[in-house]
Amino acid sequence: MRVHIDATRPAALWSLWGMTLVERLLRQLARAGAGPVWVELPAGIKLTSLLRPDFGCDGLVVDDGVRRPDDGCLVAWFDAAHVYDQRVVDRLVASTVPTAITGVLAARVYGGPAELPVERIELSSMPTYLPTLRRYRMPFVLPIETRADLADAERTTFEAVYKGVTDVVTKYLYPGLVRLIVRLLAPTRITPNQVTAVSMILSFGAIPVFAIGHLGTAIVMGLIMSVLDSVDGKLARLTMRESKTGNWMDHGSDFVYFGLWLIAVGFVAGTGVARWVLPGAWLLDKSIVGLFKITRHRELNDWAPIDAAFRLVVIRRNIFLLVLGAGVLVGAPATAVALLAAWAVIGVVFHTVRALWIVITDEPPRASRLHGEAP
């Protein structure tokens, strides 16, 4: 299928998250596996002047020269003065017949043999559950006519890539700060993987700092790392620079460094069985949650409202830093470790009971307000 991008309106050349709307659409088309793309631009403007230096969409053939005849083939047409949800782009590029979206005039598929009927679809017919973000979100097509529209699109697209089910710190304290940092980094040549690398240096660097008893310093390192760990994923999704390497660096290291944090803190600040219960219970809890995901193809913390609510406070990095930090501030780190150990055990019991209940009763997944928009 060929693609025709109409970028003749001024708003198509405006920038969102460090790239023009034309480039954003081109990157989305590359993700969707689109065929040759013809970009229609205002007179005197070259496409290369609208692209970032790091633009490189493997396999996407782009032309801003003379339009080729359609020759009876299907053509996906997009008005670049809009911001598109990736699911909309995917759906149109995958069409095998002329396709129109009800209420959306900015994108359609036309052409093909004359006898082919036009398929009419609804935005609501596209997938609304986003498993990697543990949230529900309706697909969108946002018209951009004014700078206020662009500001609204920034807010909408940021919210669209933010996880629904997560811990209380990430969900309620970080969004404003993370959005500001991503806005500053998006136009630069700093890549998401570079942000991840700095985050990894801090996370692994905090291990010996925890181990020698400098808990305050290690906690500060952990908090900075925690913010960057939220920034890298948003930066990657919003600038269309996600990669398998970045995903491995981000998620592959989490299990290793956090387990070592718990062992180091338990050894330095814990007393009695608490120093071993904390890492042991956390490891058992992770195993239960991981096994559930493998067998049920969805995270246990993402299954129902009660699970999403418990995820807000379950023992993970940010809750650990919050409780330990409070303990250090009041001069009672051993008490903080004991509380964390007890809460980790409660997490094991909760997740074990919930996993067994879901399997035995065949309870279906259910959304909550923490998931974002209801399906």
Image (cartoon, grey):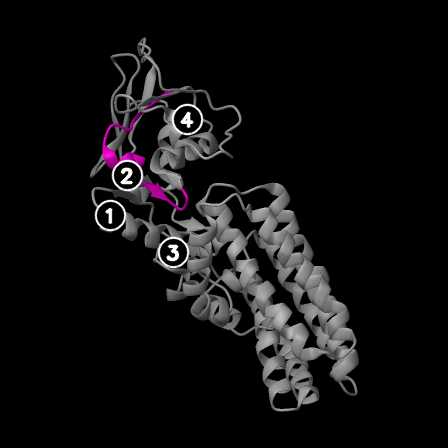
Residue 55 image position (x, y, % from top left)? 49, 32
- Magenta residues (range): 1-18
Mark 1: amino acid: Arg
In this rendering, would 2 be left or right of 297? left
**Residues at discs 2 and 4 in contact (Cβ within 8 Å):** no
Determine the residue positioned at 72% across, 70% down.
261
Residue 15 image position (x, y, % from top left)? 35, 42
Q: CA distance from mark 2 to mark 3?
A: 17 Å
Q: Which part of the image, by quadrant, shows the N terminus?
A: top left
In this rendering, would 333 be left or right of 89? right
Using the image, tell me which numbered label, if any, was put on residue 82.
Answer: 2
Earlier residue among tags 4 and 3: 4
Determine the residue positioned at 21% across, 45% down.
146
Earlier residue among tags 2 and 4: 4
Q: Which residue is mark 1?
A: 147
Q: Assign a secondary structure to mark 2.
A: strand
Residue 31 covered by magenta stretch: no
Q: Nearer the viewer, residue 70 or 289?
A: 70
Mark 4: amino acid: Thr
Mark 3: amino acid: Glu
In this rendering, would 181 be left or right of 319? left
Q: Which residue is mark 3?
A: 159
